Amino acid sequence: MLNNKALNGEKIIVNIRDIKIGIDNRPIIIAGPCSVESKNQIIETALSLKEIGVDILRGGAFKPRTSPYAFQGLGYKGLEYLKQAGEAAGIPVVTELMTENDLNIVSDCADIIQIGSRNMYNYPLLEAVGEINKPVLLKRGMSASILEWIMAAEYIAARGNKNIILCERGIRTFETYTRNTLDLSAVPIVKKKTGLPVVVDPSHGTGIRELVNPMSRAALACGADGLMIEVHLDPQNALCDGQQSITLDEYKSIYEMKRKIIISPTSIH
Amino acid sequence: MLNNKALNGEKIIVNIRDIKIGIDNRPIIIAGPCSVESKNQIIETALSLKEIGVDILRGGAFKPRTSPYAFQGLGYKGLEYLKQAGEAAGIPVVTELMTENDLNIVSDCADIIQIGSRNMYNYPLLEAVGEINKPVLLKRGMSASILEWIMAAEYIAARGNKNIILCERGIRTFETYTRNTLDLSAVPIVKKKTGLPVVVDPSHGTGIRELVNPMSRAALACGADGLMIEVHLDPQNALCDGQQSITLDEYKSIYEMKRKIIISPTSIH
Amino acid sequence: MLNNKALNGEKIIVNIRDIKIGIDNRPIIIAGPCSVESKNQIIETALSLKEIGVDILRGGAFKPRTSPYAFQGLGYKGLEYLKQAGEAAGIPVVTELMTENDLNIVSDCADIIQIGSRNMYNYPLLEAVGEINKPVLLKRGMSASILEWIMAAEYIAARGNKNIILCERGIRTFETYTRNTLDLSAVPIVKKKTGLPVVVDPSHGTGIRELVNPMSRAALACGADGLMIEVHLDPQNALCDGQQSITLDEYKSIYEMKRKIIISPTSIH
Amino acid sequence: MLNNKALNGEKIIVNIRDIKIGIDNRPIIIAGPCSVESKNQIIETALSLKEIGVDILRGGAFKPRTSPYAFQGLGYKGLEYLKQAGEAAGIPVVTELMTENDLNIVSDCADIIQIGSRNMYNYPLLEAVGEINKPVLLKRGMSASILEWIMAAEYIAARGNKNIILCERGIRTFETYTRNTLDLSAVPIVKKKTGLPVVVDPSHGTGIRELVNPMSRAALACGADGLMIEVHLDPQNALCDGQQSITLDEYKSIYEMKRKIIISPTSIH
């Protein structure tokens, strides 16, 4: 069943400007708020993160919400603000693409295009991002098997775009204490089978602020090429995902932990 | 969390030509092959089903496959053949819409637009079909909670289109003997909460030919407004879903069973 | 993997006094409260059920609770009361055995020994009940695969006791609206593979009072040999499982529905 | 619902001879074969592990198998051999207790009594081990929620025995690539809520030999107090769990990794 012709396990490094994702012992960090809430908020967050240290800024402009009446994101305005924030801080940005009709405009604003968990099976969308050159961050579907996830990446690569960063973000299980069950065992498996870099999102992966730090450590310890973390200037008042967003101080601890790994490869890695 | 303003439990009957979906004790049947394989195949299947008795013809033109290298369907040609088959047999047709860019062409060929399980969270797609008048068959996501499913229907209804037929097709669980676990308890729950008609797909719901008949009985017994069944002229040689497709003879038994319920309301219903 | 030598699919009818479980179109009903709460309660319930019509009385004396501080049942006194209630109403009783050390005393009080969902993997316990002649009601583990369930029955039959009634009671899934997900597709599968009678528990299977009736219908429609239903004189004040227990009136509707199936085999069955 | 009176979060160190389980940055390792296959095998394994470095020896005498016809373990003889192996290597041993009727004999042979995943809901068994002084290794049920697991520990502690080591061993999910889904997020949660030490079993947790090392790293990185690993002299010919058992060489790498954490606390921990 695993008919992966385009991705066959040969190591692939994804390049964004001067950042290389996938180099052993050189994990990167993607951080930012769940969504772009205002121009000030996203710019301030970007600058604060840059001061501490960050590789890529995240921020959602189009938010997939369970209810049509919940905050849906700032939309196109949000994309603009995100782009401005990236320029202000001098860092690349990643944001979610919800429909192929927005491919051009999102491509114009972002350095990396994110395919969200709910869209991992959206094959027309995968084919669309497969036909451009821009790096794609492909989140595992919340109930996608490892094989389905690998084949979703194959949909993209088969069209010519192998600049794919896989992102494990937890899977849906019977457990309700955590929002999802973070499946770290998937990390070494998909790294080996596809050759692609794999990052881990401990924010959606657990849904609990206090777990972001320990699960970040665990993720890097088992070989993840990076982390994707929700950081908010004021989590209690975030428009979405507040309970899993961490503060800048909490982010700093995680950044420091990651830095040590790079400096001292004789550690747990 | 359940903020369903558009669908509040008031009973909704969905009309397609002279067919009414949602009338108590008047279940309907949707039947046909997994995919349109050729013009002859779909027309012959349609005529055979018509002869036995059927309300609506199904057939996929764009097939969502786990692998990009698997048969993807006949595409636009498949839509044409399906439309011709419906006209030949004088019955309405339903087919899956994969991207809002195909909305017009699919709308032109089909009487009901199906949103597949893998697209239940594709909110832009839901909004697109919410803005037309055509009936929509909304399949439950394979790992969608009942509440998420109800809110997905709300996405469509909130845009003005309340002609929604919900379809329970099994959920993903730890059990591997069946392809999915058919969750019949969802039927009375969502019927009551949304007021919408609910049909059941025992084909995907079990993945096993021998289970289609008993689960069809169970579905109608608990109040489903209809069934959606994969029928193939030659299941062993079907291009997809052969192991769960039933023959015309097996379909006939199920149709007869359904007919009896209509004739004799003092039965189990 | 399915090495079922003792249970090979040959039909097995389980006899308790003059009741035969497993005859086509002759479903039986087991009903009673979640637990024996007092001598009066269980006797009154038994007499009331008898008046409406019931085959077997259920009632728990030893309740497996998630917390050690929750009501654990009346224990040995509960067994006595249950036995007295069965005698007063002239019907057989079934109750759960928690440890092989209680085998004799439970055997003495009950006509059928129940192995609960949490004990389906308790192989020493299965072997113990496999060595006696008394009928055993084997509940499916809440996360047991169909194959594991069949082999659990094999543990019992391999020791010589083939008087096994299987009971599907819902499996644990991601869905939280229902307490468990009732897996009716398991019914025809295990009936065919083992030859054993299979009953369905729609009470634990859904955890919701309003679903007990429709799921009872669905269970019988797909061939279940009976139902196991929690009935309470006053569900709102039940010591456990109140929200899924039905009243005597609600029970009456279900009994009437079952009776019709027996009278009129040309119905949905 | 979380009514944990006996275990309230106060840190508990579990002592076995001179080993202390639960000290920060002092993880321990439990290693050994899935089952005791012969006297020579278990003694040789114990001595080899001792030579490399190990804290506690594991080995099953009574194996819970899905099928009654599969190898069930050497039983009482196995216990003897295990005890002899522990004495020969001068290390404590842990083995699984299947029924309270074996409590004395297992107590006599082992330093730690293991309650297996399939018995986490066996409340009479939990109460029995709650009444002795010996340390208990309580494995999480394969589909047990974190809260149920905590309350299972409460059953033991409520009877007076707080010498409990919790063991996360993976949970049952839809994913079939791995045998279970190792839920590392549970580690910091239950450590904090109960105060008990928590070890991780990456062998059952993944079912795949190549994943034992990376998941061991991840487990220690997120704060696990130790690891429980299946090691076999010749995994290809192991009587059970061969595909997840690692060789002595592979074990050595993991032991070395653990040792570095103790020597250098300024690493990822």
Image: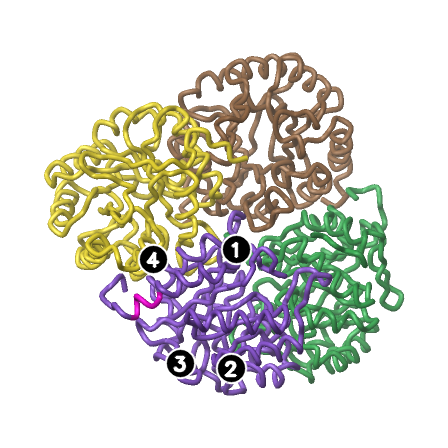
Chain colours: A green, B purple, C yellow, D brown
Q: CA distance from mark 2 to mark 1?
A: 26 Å
Quarter of the image with the C terminus of chain B is bottom left
Q: CA distance from mark 3 to mark 2?
A: 11 Å
The residue pinned by badge 1 equals B207
Q: Badge 1: few (under 14), some or many (20 or more) residues near its Cα, within 10 Å?
A: many
Chain of the residue that carries numbered disc 1 in the rendered image: B
Q: Check disc 1 and report its element: helix, strand or loop.
A: loop
The reply to whether callout 4 and callout 3 are in contact (CB within 8 Å) is no
The residue pinned by badge 4 equals C218
Judged by depth in the image, the label closer to the viewer, 4 or 3, is 3
What amino acid is found at the position of numbered circle 3 in the picture? Answer: Ile
Q: CA distance from mark 4 to mark 3?
A: 25 Å
Q: Check disc 2 and report its element: helix, strand or loop.
A: loop
Locate residue D238, reporting x and y percent: 66, 25
Q: CA distance from mark 2 to mark 4?
A: 30 Å
The tag on residue B19 is 3
> Quick check: B179 above or below B122?
above
Comparing C3 with B257, the one in front is B257
Magenta residues (range): B258-262
Magenta region's main secondary structure? helix
Quarter of the image with the N terminus of chain B is bottom left
Comparing B228 with B85, the one in front is B85
Chain of the residue that carries numbered disc 2 in the rendered image: B
Instruction: Give whichever of discs 3 and 2 has the lower sequence position.
Output: 3
Instruction: Give whichever of discs 1 and 3 has the lower sequence position.
Output: 3
Q: Kindly indicate whether the residues beneath marks 4 and 3 are on one polypeptide chain.
A: no
- Whether residue A170 sits left or right of residue A19 in the image: it is left
